[in-house]
Image (spheres, grey):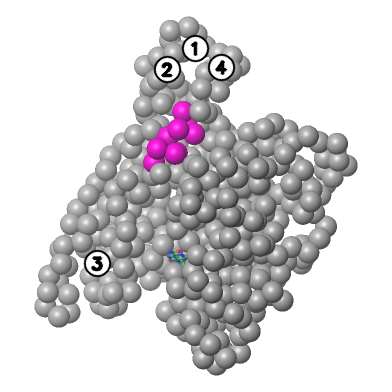
């Protein structure tokens, strides 16, 4: 997975090396040397912090839990990235996620670097009291490397505002007298969080899709009529008609994305399938997404898994296998669960022609190359799922000034930033044969390279 990110960065650097209008002062051997430095800086993290949290459980047993905080790059500002609570968390995964954060922040011009954390547990195996202890221990063990101007964690898979509230409280206790509101983002609104943060990623994910199709492609229909660009041709087929939508993952990101699609007044969407770690639910006439959100809120985040549960909740759907959603005959597939979901094994069976990556790294290199070759429009993770970090930045700013924005102000700023990035990228994407992911990487790497050069880091 990490290899995949590295190789696209290398590709982007190769393209920039050939571009004589980029860093024009650097010529000949100097240029070659600077680009070699750039590659080694961007493809390796600055630091990897690892600890085994020692946590006494309620039954008296003491466990040691592998935990990570990775600092990838801070050329653009303090490290920033979520803490994943999942039983498969490992060092390689956290390094790759931190790498993606560096690229994502550079892409959207957010003044943060890239970081990420992970705790190797299935949170559902622990009581609330035990989870509280785990959060406290994480802050104690990593206190020296986090902080409002050093590294600002946030929620990720398996964590949310409850965990961020606990962690910030511990940070405040340890660092008495120091500013603390900016130490964690994704906190509850009552505890200094931003209005709109919880929904920000899912709203942003849906927005990138809507903006690409309903604004950019629709507005350029006349120009696109004679295009030979494979992605423009695909996108054109989906303008001005009802679309069937499937959403993999029904947590923080997936449930909000599904709700946005369900409620969207600009595009006729029918959300025919959603899935989670247990099941896929399908209804050709469209699922009742608000009812499913209500159900998950009362059932520890899980979708209904039996006919009885569906009937009791008044939801019409058939139950299918967890992976079935990936190969369903739908127009648009939103991926909002985990990485490596579209891969070498299932790539030839994917039917959706528009894929939006709410999750980080849900498509492997093999699947990405195969689908892009076939003209499938893929809106990549670092473009689509940046809503969380953009609103985290707003939360961090609000915490520093103790002045808070209204929900409307937050959304306006979020969408303006995402629109700005899309307006920079889309003309290039629909004008050349690079995938949108390659275009995003070139853009991020250009920004990072320029800053690293100006900071004198390439000698
Ligand atoms: P979450 O824990 O709230 O939800 C994860 C969802 O995925 C749950 O519905 C879970 O049941 C489901 N799931 C887990 N394993 C699965 C499997 N094997 N197959 C299908 N579904 C499975 O997590 P989240 O915060 O919604 O994050 C989802 C993805 O979005 C992750 O890749 C995360 O890194 C990325 N992301 C999250 C944010 C954020 O603000 N929360 C921001 C950017 C990116």
According to the image, label 4 marks what residue? 18
Residue stretch rendered in magenta on the structure: 2-10
For the C terminus, the image quarter is top left
Residue 225's label in the rendered image is none
Residue at x 61%, y 89% (from the top left corner): 314
Q: Count the marks.
A: 4
Q: How much space separates mark 1 and mark 2, taking CA atoms?
A: 8 Å
In the visual, does 195 lie left or right of 59?
Answer: right
Between marks 4 and 2 in the image, the one whose residue lies nearer the viewer? 4
Q: Position of residue 105 (x, y in %)?
A: 50, 43
Q: How much space separates mark 4 and mark 3, taking CA atoms?
A: 49 Å
Q: Main secondary structure of the magenta part?
A: helix
According to the image, label 1 marks what residue? 26
In the visual, does 332 lie left or right of 151?
Answer: right
Q: Are marks 1 and 2 in contact (CB under 8 Å)?
A: yes
Q: Secondary structure at mark 2?
A: helix
According to the image, label 2 marks what residue? 34
Say which quarter of the image contains residue 433. top right
Q: How much space separates mark 2 and mark 3, taking CA atoms?
A: 43 Å
Between marks 4 and 1 in the image, the one whose residue lies nearer the viewer? 4
Q: Of label 1 and label 2, which has the lower sequence position?
A: 1
Mark 2: give few (<14), some (14-19) or many (20+) Cα within 10 Å: some
Q: Of label 4 and label 3, which has the lower sequence position?
A: 4
Is residue 97 something one can see in this rendering?
yes
Magenta span includes 125: no
Q: Are marks 3 and 1 in contact (CB under 8 Å)?
A: no
Q: Along the line of sight, which residue is nearer the eye, 447 or 190? A: 447
Q: Of label 3 and label 1, which has the lower sequence position?
A: 1
Residue at x 31%, y 68% (from the top left corner): 122
Q: How much space separates mark 3 and mark 1, taking CA atoms?
A: 49 Å
């Amino acid at each position: 997975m990490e290899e995949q990110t590295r190789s696209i960065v290398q590709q982007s650097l190769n393209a920039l090396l050939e571009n004589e209008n980029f860093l024009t002062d650097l010529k000949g051997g100097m240029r070659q040397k600077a680009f070699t430095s750039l590659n080694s800086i961007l493809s390796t993290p600055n630091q990897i912090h690892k600890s085994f949290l020692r946590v006494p459980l309620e039954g008296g047993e003491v466990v040691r839990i592998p935990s990570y905080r990775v600092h990838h790059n801070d050329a653009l500002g303090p490290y920033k990235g979520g803490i994943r609570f999942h039983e498969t968390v490992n060092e390689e995964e956290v390094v790759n996620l931190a790498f993606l954060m560096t690229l994502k922040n550079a892409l959207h011009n957010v003044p943060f670097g890239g970081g990420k954390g992970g705790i190797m547990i299935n949170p559902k195996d622990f009581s609330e009291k035990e989870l509280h202890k785990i959060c406290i221990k994480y802050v104690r063990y990593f206190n020296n490397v986090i902080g409002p101007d050093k590294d600002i964690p946030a929620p990720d898979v398996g964590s949310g505002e409850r965990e961020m509230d606990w962690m910030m409280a511990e940070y405040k206790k340890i660092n008495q007298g120091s500013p603390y509101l900016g130490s964690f983002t994704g906190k509850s609104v009552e505890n200094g969080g931003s209005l709109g943060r919880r929904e920000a990623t899912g709203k942003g994910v849906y927005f990138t899709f809507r903006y690409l199709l309903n604004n950019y492609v629709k507005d350029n229909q006349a120009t696109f009529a004679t295009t030979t660009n494979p992605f423009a041709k695909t996108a054109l087929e989906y303008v001005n008609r009802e679309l069937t939508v499937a959403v993999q993952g029904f947590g923080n990101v997936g449930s909000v994305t599904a709700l946005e699609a369900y409620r969207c007044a600009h595009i006729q969407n029918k959300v025919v399938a959603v899935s989670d770690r247990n099941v896929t639910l399908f209804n050709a006439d469209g699922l009742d997404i608000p009812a499913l959100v209500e159900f998950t809120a009362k059932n520890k985040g899980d979708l209904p898994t039996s006919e009885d549960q569906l009937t009791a909740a008044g939801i019409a759907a058939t139950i299918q296998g967890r992976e079935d959603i990936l190969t369903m005959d739908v127009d648009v597939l939103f991926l909002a669960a985990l990485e490596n979901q579209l891969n070498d094994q299932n790539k030839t069976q994917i039917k959706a022609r528009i894929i939006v990556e709410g999750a980080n790294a849900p498509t492997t290199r093999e699947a990405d190359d195969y689908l892009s070759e076939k003209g499938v429009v893929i809106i990549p993770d670092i473009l689509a799922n940046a809503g969380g970090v953009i609103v985290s930045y707003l939360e961090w700013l609000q915490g520093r000034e103790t002045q808070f924005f209204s929900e409307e102000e937050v959304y306006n700023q979020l969408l303006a930033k995402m629109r700005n990035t899309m307006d920079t990228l889309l003309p290039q994407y629909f004008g050349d044969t690079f995938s949108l992911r390659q275009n995003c990487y070139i853009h991020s790497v250009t920004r990072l390279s320029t800053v690293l050069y100006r900071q004198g880091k390439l000698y």
